[in-house]
Image (cartoon, rainbow, N blue to C red):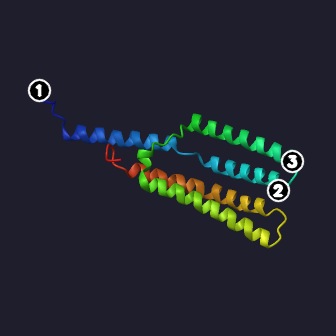
Amino acid sequence: MSEPAVSPAAAAAALTELHARRDQAVTATLVPSWYWAAVGGLMVAFTAAVETHRPWVVAVGSVGYAVALGALIVVVVRRHRAQVRTSLLGARGAVAIVGFVFALVGLGLATGFAAEALDVRWPATTGAAITGITMALTGPRLMRHLRGVMTARPIGGGR
């Protein structure tokens, strides 16, 4: 049984459609820009609650952080369908994410320890604030980078 002939124009059109659909899917799965600032704000509020050293404030701050972060994640997953397939990210995407996290943790620790050495009143909150601001500013850039990584991968190519 022979396969039907496909014209080069039809094949090119189908490939263009595949690329457009993939780009649409990749864009829909990215974490929205507002998420980074929201998580940064939650980090600062939680850290400040802990640094009060008042048990009731720590308890309220901890529960509030957990509930608010859970709600943010639910909103992102439901509305923005943030479910990126690891096969689209590849090693380059994974390295970018791990590097981003390590850089933010390092920045937070270095800032917090420096603030403590300078006798800043709430050093951990200072570190969290710098980290949260940096995350809000650079999270969208990470998403742009990951979009580029995912859309550059060949369609149907090796994983």
Tag 3 residue: 55
Q: Earlier in the sequence, mark 1 or mark 2?
A: 1
Q: Which is in the foreground here, disc 3 or disc 1?
A: 3
| Viewer-nearest residue: 21 or 138 | 138
| Type of amino acid under label 1 | Met
Q: Are marks 3 and 2 in contact (CB under 8 Å)?
A: no
Q: Residue at x 41, y 45 (%)?
A: 87
Residue at the far left: name it: 1
Q: Is residue 120 above or below residue 101?
A: below
Q: Residue at x 63, y 58 (%)?
A: 137
Q: Give me the C-alpha separation between circle 3 and circle 1.
A: 76 Å
Q: Is residue 67 above or below residue 114?
A: above
Q: Are marks 3 and 1 in contact (CB under 8 Å)?
A: no
Give the quarter of the image for residue 103. bottom right
Would you call the spot at circle 2 few (<14 residues within 10 Å), some (14-19), or many (20 or more)?
Answer: some
| Viewer-nearest residue: 85 or 154 | 85
Q: Give me the C-alpha separation between circle 1 and circle 2.
A: 74 Å
Give the quarter of the image for residue 51. bottom right
Q: Which mark is residue 114?
A: none
